[in-house]
Image (cartoon, rainbow, N blue to C red):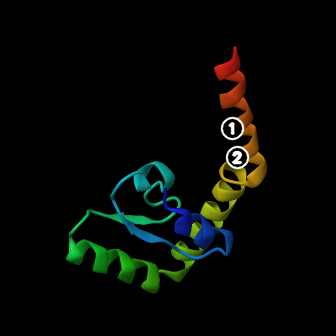
Amino acid sequence: FGRVLLEAWQVKTPIVATRVGHIETIIHHGAHGLLAPYNDDQALAEALLTQLTNRDQARAMAETAHTHCRENFSLIEYNRQAEEIYTNALD
């Protein structure tokens, strides 16, 4: 699921990740962090350099990601989604 991404967002850490599994459903490239193709070392290095050299952009993405995390992955939201699943299953 990428729990470490959520933990990083909670402390406003800029993210660079690879496009594997469900990561793309969590991170929107350019809004919440940067994504590089899987197994592309050059693209990963470029994304890391972008985050390191464009500090204002990295901070803005981290702030946006922090808000996104709070709104979509909080304990309250998790409980709401779980309740919705159970309610739908029981109907």
Task: Give me the residue at 75% from left, 53% from top.
Answer: 75
Q: With respect to residue 22, does 13 lie above or below? A: below
Q: Amino acid at mark 1?
A: Gln
The answer to whether 44 is drawn above or below residue 1 in the figure is below
Which residue in the structure is indicated by mark 2?
78
Task: Find residue 87 and report its horizontal and vertical position in percent.
Answer: 72, 24
Are the two marked residues, 2 and 1, in contact with CB atoms closer than 8 angstroms? Answer: yes
Please report the residue visible at 49 percent of the width from the left and 61 percent of the height from the top. Answer: 2
Residue that lies at the very extreme toward the front in this rendered image? 90
Q: Which residue is at 25% across, 72% downward?
A: 43
Q: In the drawing, does residue 22 fall left or right of residue 11?
A: left
Please state the horizontal and vertical placement of residue 67, each as a whole percent of the image.
69, 59
Q: Amino acid at mark 2?
A: Tyr
Label ID, residue 21: none
Seen in the picture, residue 2 relative to 40 is either above or below; the reply is above
Instruction: Tell me the residue that label 1 is attached to.
Output: 81
Side of 40 where 1 appears, left or right:
right
Where's residue 88, x and y in %? 67, 21
Residue 58, image x, y percentages: 53, 75
Q: Quadrant of the C terminus?
A: top right
Residue situated furthest top in the rendering: 91
Q: Give the mark count.
A: 2
Q: Residues within 10 Å of mark 1 (few under 14, many from 20)?
A: some
Q: Label 1's element? A: helix
Q: Which of the 4 image quadrants contains residue 64? A: bottom right
What kind of element bears circle 2? helix
